[in-house]
Amino acid sequence: MTVRTCLPWPDKHLRSRAAEVSSITEETLQIWQDMIDTMEAMPGVGLAANQIGILQRLAVVDGSAERGRAVRLANPEVLHASVELRAHEEASPNLPGVSANIKRPRAVTVRYMDETGAVVERDFVGIEATSVQHQIDHLNGKMYFDRLSKVKRDMLLRKAKKLNG
């Protein structure tokens, strides 16, 4: 079990688009396990590889009540998003102490490569839909606060700077 350190904002990895994963290797499986250990230690409902300094399109999501049901995703992409939006208080271990209410599609269909290397399409709803979209944003070099208006984003970043030095 390895809990990795989440990079502090504004580390450049957090603004970088992660590279596609061509195949699932032993190293990929180990990175995913470290990501799950890190997510559980927070505790959180998801983590993207660039949050821990790895620029590969890898993410984990676990919105289950009992935990231990993490979905491992490589190269996740949203194929379909519901018209209905869901608001959720989002945060990031890369910018501790602050959060914002973000509206995202309530349900999404995502295509990704799973831990066996198979390409899978799966529907995510509710907290898991929010989390998988949040992780895909990370993999594209975006933070949740990029979805806020400039005024709200600036206020959130000022507050975070006060809290985190």
Image (cartoon, grey):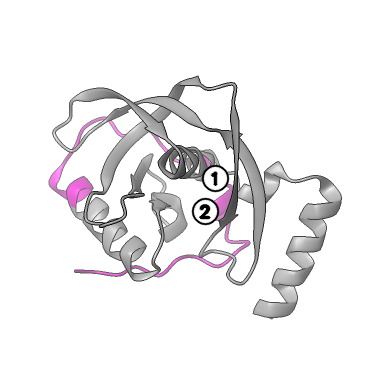
Q: Does 6 lie within the magenta span?
A: yes
Q: Residue 154 location, x and y as percent?
A: 81, 58
Mark 2: secondary structure: helix
**149 on left or right of 70:** right
Whether pointer 1 and pointer 2 mark residues with C-beta atoms closer than 8 Å, the reply is: yes
Amino acid marked by disc 1: Ser
Residue at 25% across / 51% down in the picture?
32
Residue 16: give its label: 1
Say whether residue 67 is left or right of residue 164: left
Which residue lies most toward the right here?
151
Q: Which image quarter is the C terminus in?
A: bottom right
Q: Quadrant of the N terminus?
A: bottom left
Whole-percent x, y for residue 93 in the image: 51, 65
Foreground residue, 93 or 16? 93
Q: Which residues are magenta?
A: 1-29
Q: Main secondary structure of the magenta part?
A: loop
- The residue that label 2 is drawn on is 13
Task: Determine the secondary structure under disc 1.
Answer: loop
For the residue carrying disc 2, how many other residues have a C-alpha within 10 Å: few (<14), some (14-19), or many (20+)? many
Q: CA distance from mark 1 to mark 2?
A: 5 Å
Q: Is residue 141 shown above or below 124?
A: below
In the depicted structure, whether residue 132 falls above or below residue 90: above
Q: Disc 2 marks which amino acid?
A: His
**Which residue does the image show at 24% across and 69% down from the upper left?**
2
**x and y percentages locating residue 115 in the rendered image:** 18, 38
